[in-house]
Image (cartoon, helix red, strand yellow):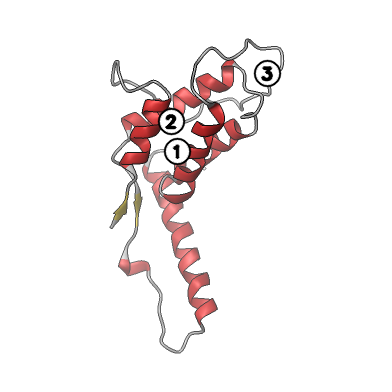
């Protein structure tokens, strides 16, 4: 089973103003360098609400797209005093999502660990561990380096 959120991705792409134009984009959601605070950088030029877009991206990264979590969290640090560089970083994430729109989180019943005599808390812990392994596999499948 694959968990995808194409509707939310479409809303994010529309909010960022990326719903028209060319289909190109990067295969990675973040650049090679960390996102700086950029206090002296140029002011925002776009008309989208940075905090709203970051909120949507945080939800998406936490539920079905863990490979964008680092890039989104870098942007979230500056969402209440954004600069142009932060807008460009959000647009890069948006272009990545547009290119990989139909990808999602794979869940497999083979990784489910269940013993009838197992306490419920232990079952939840094992399910969370299996989900963490799946997230790592998804990141590796996307070609990113941990």
Q: Position of residue 42 (x, y in %)?
A: 63, 10
Residue drawn at point x = 46 percent, y = 23 percent: 91
Furthest residue toward right = 39
Label 2: which residue? 28
The residue identified by callout 3 is 38
Closer to the camera, 97 or 112? 97
Q: Secondary structure at mark 3?
A: loop
Q: Is residue 54 left or right of residue 108?
A: right
Q: Tally the numbered discs.
A: 3
> Going 61% across and 26% down the picture, which residue do you hit?
35
Q: Dot 1 corresponds to which residue?
A: 144
Residue at disc 2, secondary structure: loop
Label 1 SS: loop
Report whether residue 145 is seen.
Answer: no
Q: Given contact means CB atoms under 8 Å apart, are the residues at marks 2 and 1 in contact?
A: yes
Decide: few, some or many residues near mark 3? Use Cα within 10 Å; few <14, some 14-19, many ≥20: some
> What residue is rendered at 52% in x and 38% in y?
55
How far from the left and from the top, in percent, is residue 128? Answer: 49, 64
Report if the CB atoms under discs 3 and 1 are less than 8 Å apart: no
Q: Residue at x 49, y 71 (%)?
A: 126
Above or below 35: residue 134: below
């Amino acid at each position: 089973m694959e968990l995808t959120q194409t509707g939310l991705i479409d809303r994010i792409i529309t909010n960022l103003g990326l719903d028209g134009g060319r289909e190109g984009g990067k295969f990675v959601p973040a650049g090679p360098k960390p996102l700086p605070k950029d206090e002296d950088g140029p002011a925002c030029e776009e008309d989208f609400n940075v905090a709203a877009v970051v909120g949507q991206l945080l939800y998406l990264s936490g539920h079905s797209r863990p490979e964008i979590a680092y890039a989104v969290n870098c942007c979230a640090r500056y969402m209440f005093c954004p600069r142009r560089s932060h807008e460009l970083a959000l647009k890069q994430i948006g272009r990545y999502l547009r290119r990989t729109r139909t990808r999602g989180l794979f869940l497999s019943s083979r990784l489910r660990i269940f013993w009838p005599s197992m306490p419920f808390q232990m079952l939840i812990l094992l399910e969370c561990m299996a989900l963490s392994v799946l997230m790592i596999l998804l990141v590796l499948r996307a070609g990113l380096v941990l």
